[in-house]
Amino acid sequence: MKKIINDPETVVQDALRGMQAAHSDLLTVHHDPAVVVRADAPVQGKVAIISGGGSGHEPLHGGFVGRGMLDAACPGAVFTSPTPDQVLDAVARTDGGAGALLIVKNYTGDVLNFETAGEMAESEVRSVVIDDDVAVKDSLYTAGRRGVGGTVLLEKIVGAAAERGDDLAACEALASRVIGSVRSMGLALTACTVPHAGTPSFELADDEMEIGIGIHGEPGRQRVRAGTASEMVSALLEPVLEDLPFAAGDRVLLFTNSMGGTPLIELYLAHGIAEQLLADRGITVERRLVGSYITSLEMQGMSLTLLRLDDEMIELWDAPVHTPALRWGV
Amino acid sequence: MKKIINDPETVVQDALRGMQAAHSDLLTVHHDPAVVVRADAPVQGKVAIISGGGSGHEPLHGGFVGRGMLDAACPGAVFTSPTPDQVLDAVARTDGGAGALLIVKNYTGDVLNFETAGEMAESEVRSVVIDDDVAVKDSLYTAGRRGVGGTVLLEKIVGAAAERGDDLAACEALASRVIGSVRSMGLALTACTVPHAGTPSFELADDEMEIGIGIHGEPGRQRVRAGTASEMVSALLEPVLEDLPFAAGDRVLLFTNSMGGTPLIELYLAHGIAEQLLADRGITVERRLVGSYITSLEMQGMSLTLLRLDDEMIELWDAPVHTPALRWGV
Amino acid sequence: MGCTAADVVAALRAAAEVVKEHRDELVRLDQAIGDGDHGENLRRGFTAVLSRLDTEEPAAPGKVLKLVATTLISTVGGAAGPLYGTAFLRASAAVGDLEELDRDAVARALQAALDGVVARGKAVVGDKTMVDALTPAVAAAASVDGSVAAVLSAAADAAAEGAESTVPMVARKGRASYLGERSAGHLDPGARSTSLLLRAFADAAAKA
Amino acid sequence: MGCTAADVVAALRAAAEVVKEHRDELVRLDQAIGDGDHGENLRRGFTAVLSRLDTEEPAAPGKVLKLVATTLISTVGGAAGPLYGTAFLRASAAVGDLEELDRDAVARALQAALDGVVARGKAVVGDKTMVDALTPAVAAAASVDGSVAAVLSAAADAAAEGAESTVPMVARKGRASYLGERSAGHLDPGARSTSLLLRAFADAAAKA
Ligand SMILES: Nc1ncnc2c1ncn2[C@@H]1O[C@H](COP(=O)(O)OP(=O)(O)O)[C@@H](O)[C@H]1O
Ligand SMILES: Nc1ncnc2c1ncn2[C@@H]1O[C@H](COP(=O)(O)OP(=O)(O)O)[C@@H](O)[C@H]1O
Ligand SMILES: [Mg+2]
Ligand SMILES: [Mg+2]
Ligand SMILES: [Mg+2]
Ligand SMILES: [Mg+2]
């Protein structure tokens, strides 16, 4: 394992120190428990939007703390959901009297820890669970689908709603609408190595890829031959399109995401193919996001996320945002 | 070789199509010859700032085309400098009557191709050559130092000067001042694979790193044991500090750059260490940039760039910029 | 003769040791069908338990169990944190203020722990989780006569068998469920850690 | 008997073939001490030369050389593009409007090519560049009597030796210079391609 770290035990804490140094105008990092909080929190009268999850997905979530997006992020150990204390601390530091909305990715660990915190919190707290990964078959008897790329779009849109003054119920309802309209799928060309594990999470031959992966370095649903970029993009986009389903005439946001180690030249190449496929189907790409926003450490690979837009979502997407990883209008 | 591409021959062209689709509000991509041009070019009365180089360093340079930075970028084949036609075309499309400044990274190929274009251009054209890499010993008898991370800062600052209306001579003088004040050094934990080569440019054992690398997947000056993050940061920062030299009381911009495949968590971790080392020496970090801005495809590794700031440079750094990769104030 | 607070502390120290020894094994099991953190999560949690036990000396078994519960909840994270945390919390409640735990109290505590895990995680036997180890352990504990050590030993044996039974299962809960059919053929890390913890408790009880 | 425009075209087609065959070798040489594109750069350039020669038939040798020069300049990029481009441009100027090239014209063209490369690239013998192959080739061409084929063959032999001589050198020009001492022990890719091109020209001339 070769990594730019000092010690697997302190990697999250050390990285948070670097974030603090780089972005002290936007956020304040608290340690013990670890919470990344918007610099001007609590914002009086504003619903606090709080998320969190395992570390190793940067810039998610800490990179989205700031005006117009998250009030706080709770970073767990690498690929490990945070503990209830962190979430409670985040709520206490950011509740400006209008309550808090917890954005939870659908993993057993995240759901249980956020749920525990929600039960213990003294503020008014609601939570929404995002589960946009179409690679996982949904069923009443399973853990259900994972929360992946759609989380970034959800945090931006709901963050903008809270910023303009929407109340807790409105934020919660909007979040549900976004969750109902967003679907994702990802693939990996290489595995990643969790610092405390020291070895890659799986081994792939030089002509193989994992399709239907999540964001925790876990293997996907299927191991297949790595084909061309066009084949890869189709393999991700088709199931996404079929699932909602998306149809001709839909207006969408297309989010082409790198898993962390994919060069931007390849990501743009894939994005171009996806745009073409959508145009061929009569789906209008109204907004797009291309880059590394929800990652699995150094994994090479990508995910595609489609969000069906309505006018309000577009307005909220375009609203000013000022965070380490997303910034416009400010 | 596993990459998200269709064909090594068309990779640059295919990626440019994706860029066009993603950023049609900011830029227009022309093919044959390949040039990425600011959407509202030519801007009357404004000096055109033009750069370019081999592809594979994304977002450099195409990702910096837009208001407040570059008027055009000329993307060569992967790791191959562009041809004079591309540069000539870029000049013709962007010269708004105030001439053009070519920002050239110091590589024999880049210098020769831009030089040839400069000789053939009908507009008034000046060029500056950036050579900020302290890993290379400078000498009258060699090709000299490479242009690396400092290029990003140079393009931002000179782009802002052109945007506020500085004339060609003023832009050129400012560029020389920035070049005189910026130094960089990089290291690699892994090699990268050029699509048309199909194999990694070098092999590193699991406990080795290359120190003093450039941005073309070439080996560095020295192969050493990969140590801790603190050791890595010192190994980069010490030679950078000694070279200019930077001294207590200096105000600097610290740019912590990923070579493409380094996870953001590691990059922030390294950035935090660098900030601490500078603070220990009494050097004030006034501005910072952390991310993947000048890369070598999927290479894991990082570079550190320090720019000694003056008030004007700070003002120009803070000036509005709206490009695919850097955006603020807009 | 029952189990005092000191005996429970000793059992937990032994368990922490076992977790440390098996950290890498649990990481590897979790890499195969999860995200590779289970061993590290438990190591972090039990290390925190040890340092709390170094400074605090809860007077009753139930108080020790409660300390373990809150420490695990606030340091482990992931699925295992709230699940093991709930298990110890319910066990603590089940034994109340007893000064010493007899075989009935231990069996009751195990049953409460299982109920807590199921209440939180909603897994049933066959889902390929720690429930597959804990369920037979609880049944064995209820059906065995004898000392606390004998009860715990029977529970540990049953848990080990239960853990083994997860190998062919297709996961329906936890991260392994994302793999679908590919999850079959692997031992569930949480079932394995449950069986290791019970074995550590049983061995400690035998020594007490 | 001299070299007509058609002969020059034939020589260039042969050269394009050789470049294609040796593309991977040149890439590997450039990977060792440069950025791994030299073979691909030349392949791209000479492929473009071939397609231009398919549609245009320049009437004189000098015009063929000029077409090659402009095509290489606009398609190769990197260091090799302007350097080989300048070489062919100067060679074209050196042979003027001649309908056929004799041995003197060929020797003059080679000298002009070298002067062009040196004027642009400022390398001297010993810097570990194509100049180390081209310099002895020009000297050999000037000193040999006989046919165009004999002149080119002597030049190619000298270029091959000159290319070999780059192996122990520490580079002072081009990308290999960034490696410092580590550049020693490797053949310079540009010197190798110069020697390959001259050998292809010589072999074509011998067949003409
Ligand atoms: N719903 C559930 N009910 C019971 N146990 C579960 C459930 N989900 C997961 N587990 C257990 O948790 C273990 C994984 O724990 P751990 O790796 O620490 O957390 P995470 O899955 O969040 O990374 C699994 O092996 C399984 O035994
Ligand atoms: N200043 C120079 N003068 C002469 N030849 C040079 C010079 N710099 C580089 N070269 C030649 O160019 C070759 C590399 O060409 P190529 O790989 O195509 O370009 P780049 O170095 O830009 O990638 C070197 O092997 C060397 O022979
Ligand atoms: Mg986990
Ligand atoms: Mg090159
Ligand atoms: Mg796990
Ligand atoms: Mg090269």
Image (cartoon, coloured by chain):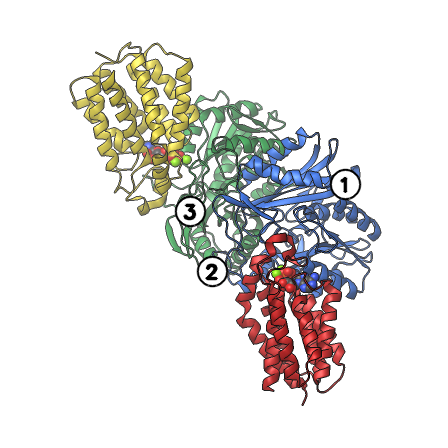
Chain colours: A green, B blue, C yellow, D red
User: Ligand 2 closer than 8 Å to the CB at disc 1?
Assistant: no
Q: Residues within 10 Å of mark 2 (few under 14, many from 20)?
A: some
> Which is more toward the observer, A301 or D19?
D19
Q: Amino acid at mark 3?
A: Ile
Residue C19's image quarter? top left
Specify the quadrant that holds the C terminus of chain B.
top right
- Measured as percent of width and height from the top left, residue D27 is found at 55, 63
Chain at numbered mark 1: B
Q: Which mark is residue A222?
A: none
Separation (CA) of disc 1 from disc 2: 45 Å
Looking at the image, is C120 positioned above or below residue A263? above
| Both labels 2 and 3 in a single chain | yes
Mark 2 — residue? A228
Query: Which labelled disc corresponds to residue A213?
Result: 3
- Coordinates of residue C111 in the picture (x, y in percent): 25, 23
Element assignment for label 2? loop
